[in-house]
Image (spheres, rainbow, N blue to C red):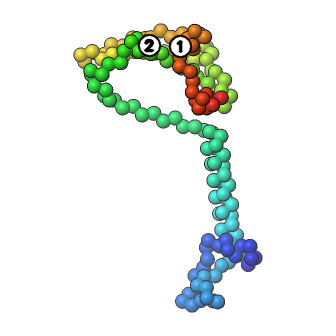
Amino acid sequence: MPRFLKNFDLFPSPIPSFNIKGKTTVQTFAGGTLSLIIYVVTLLFAALKLMHLCSKHNPSINTNVQKDHFKPDDIFDAKERRFMLAVTLADYYTNEVKDDPRYVKWFANYAEHDKGKKKERELPMHRCTDADYEKFYPVDEVSAERVN
């Protein structure tokens, strides 16, 4: 058995009820070769997964909906708080905006629950103008780096 494979053996064969030169197992060339192959494949797999993690390849998006979280008397008045929301759809890799009106149509519905009755209406939506963007708080540096 070659020396470089001697310490790689994951599959040593037990010697029946005695030892040879103080060892209770015998290492074989086949076991050393198989061990080396397993080490290399494991290292390559780990390197590939690390590359995917660092390059944000194949991201997964998780959502969690918690129903009945708020009490009926918890009220959020969007007009009073001057609530605004901007949404876009962008390519993950090129960051190119995908808003072609032939393929993308945005809808926003507003729902209220009043004494057990649900009232729902569609909110008007429009493409943001420069004046709209100025109304938002500035983007923090960490978020801006993630987008670019």
Residue 135's mark?
1
Give me the residue at 32% from left, 19% from top. 75
Whether residue 11 is visible, yes or no, is yes
Q: Foreground: 121 or 79?
A: 79
Whether residue 92 is visible, yes or no, is no
Amino acid identity at mark 1: Lys
Q: Foreground: 71 or 110?
A: 71
Residue 82's mark?
2
Do residues under tags 1 and 2 come within 8 Å of each other at their CB atoms? Answer: yes
Q: Is residue 33 left or right of residue 141?
A: right
Question: Where residue 138 sits in the image (x, y, percent)?
Answer: 56, 21
* Up-down relation of residue 30 to residue 64 (above or below): below
Which quadrant holds the C terminus? top right
Question: Where residue 128 sits in the image (x, y, percent)?
Answer: 57, 12
Which residue sits furthest left? 115
Q: Secondary structure at mark 2?
A: loop
- Cα–Cα span, label 1 and label 2: 10 Å
* Up-down relation of residue 39 to residue 56 (above or below): below
